[in-house]
């Protein structure tokens, strides 16, 4: 068990804790055990991020808050001290299917600085992804890009990551990438994004007990690559909490020529 002594407790912005929806926990008991592992890893707050495509396919997007409350009640009943908040993980091709109210229902941050989690595609189509992030910004939402290091098409596209950051996007690297679960390329890109300061937070992207939280293990990898603990720990604590509390500033309008 991890005993974290840092003043700011850890927070996860990408975590599949909702049962019986996607490839996350198979049932409520599985969700409770996954939550126990998060607490053991030093985490006290999780945003629940089921795949939007699965919510739409099952016709339960509107049930999301109630289902998160059900998980919260189960955690309290099991004496698991983990705060859960409603969210979801967008794929780029989900964006046209959602109205602004639906996007706001899965967004985080205060009014005027709301943002959504959108995953970088695992199988190419960086162009479609970039179109989707631009559309989200045009509709008034900031973007937190999930696991860009797992999208070779995006990482190899010259200037794409820097252009997204210049447009106001924030980047989230998977802890599982840093620990090698997704291969050497994703691991190397994840480390490079974090060491260069172009990624803002780390999240486990945990799915179930067999794919558990990995924040502590990820920080050990970064330490082995020369990142001091004082620089790495905020990536799993202060930085994600700041995004929840303060949001992401609206994209700047291009100046007229």
Image: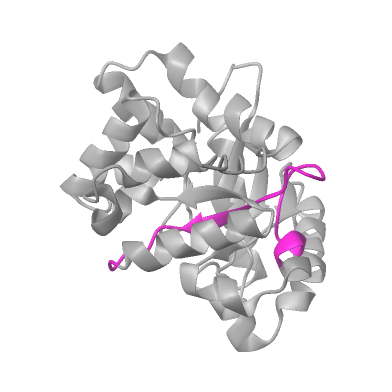
| Left or right: residue 126 compared with residue 170 | left
Which residue sits at x=32%, y=20%?
223
User: Magenta segment, which residues?
Assistant: 103-124
- Main SS, magenta region, reads loop
Above or below — where is 188 with respect to 152? above
| Left or right: residue 67 compared with residue 242 | right
Extreme residue toward the left, this view: 184
| Left or right: residue 10 compared with residue 210 | right
Residue 129, percent across and down? 42, 63
Which residue sits at x=63%, y=87%?
58
Where residue 7 sits, quadrant-wise, is: top right
Give whichever of 226, 166 is nearer the camera.
166
Q: From where the camera sits, is residue 172 visible?
A: no
Taking the magenta stretch, the answer to whether it contains residue 190 is: no
Where residue 68 sits, quadrant-wise, is: bottom right
| Left or right: residue 249 compared with residue 52 | right
Residue 44, percent across and down? 67, 37
Where residue 130 sits, quadrant-wise, is: bottom left
Give whichever of 255, 204 is nearer the camera.
255
Above or below — where is 168 with respect to 54? above
Residue 22, percent across and down? 53, 74
Q: From where the camera sits, is residue 68 visible?
A: yes
Which residue sits at x=82%, y=59%?
73
Extreme residue toward the bottom, this view: 58
Give whichever of 33, 112 is nearer the camera.
112
Residue 5, percent across and down? 59, 17
């Amino acid at each position: 068990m991890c005993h974290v002594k840092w003043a700011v407790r850890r927070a996860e912005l990408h975590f599949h804790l909702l049962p019986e929806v996607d490839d996350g926990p198979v049932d409520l008991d599985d969700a409770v055990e996954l939550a126990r592992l998060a607490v053991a890893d030093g985490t006290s707050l999780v945003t629940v991020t089921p795949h939007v495509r699965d919510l739409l396919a099952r016709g339960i997007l509107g049930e999301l808050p109630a289902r998160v409350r059900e998980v919260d009640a189960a955690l309290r009943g099991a004496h698991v001290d983990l705060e859960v908040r409603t969210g979801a993980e967008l794929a780029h091709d989900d964006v046209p299917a959602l109205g602004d109210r639906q996007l706001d229902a899965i967004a985080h941050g205060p009014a005027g600085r709301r943002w959504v989690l959108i995953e970088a595609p695992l199988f190419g189509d960086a162009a479609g992804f970039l179109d989707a992030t631009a559309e989200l910004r045009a509709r008034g939402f900031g973007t937190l890009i999930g696991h860009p290091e797992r999208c070779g098409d995006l990482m190899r596209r010259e200037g794409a990551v820097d252009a997204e950051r210049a447009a106001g996007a924030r980047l989230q690297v998977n802890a599982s990438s840093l620990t090698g679960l997704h291969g050497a390329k994703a691991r190397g890109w994840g480390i490079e994004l974090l060491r260069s300061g172009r990624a803002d937070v780390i999240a486990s992207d945990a799915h179930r007990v067999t794919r558990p939280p990995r924040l502590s293990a990820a920080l050990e990898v970064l330490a082995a690559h020369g990142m001091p603990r004082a620089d790495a720990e905020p990536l799993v604590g202060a930085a994600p909490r700041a995004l929840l509390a303060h949001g992401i500033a609206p994209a700047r309008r291009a100046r007229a020529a």
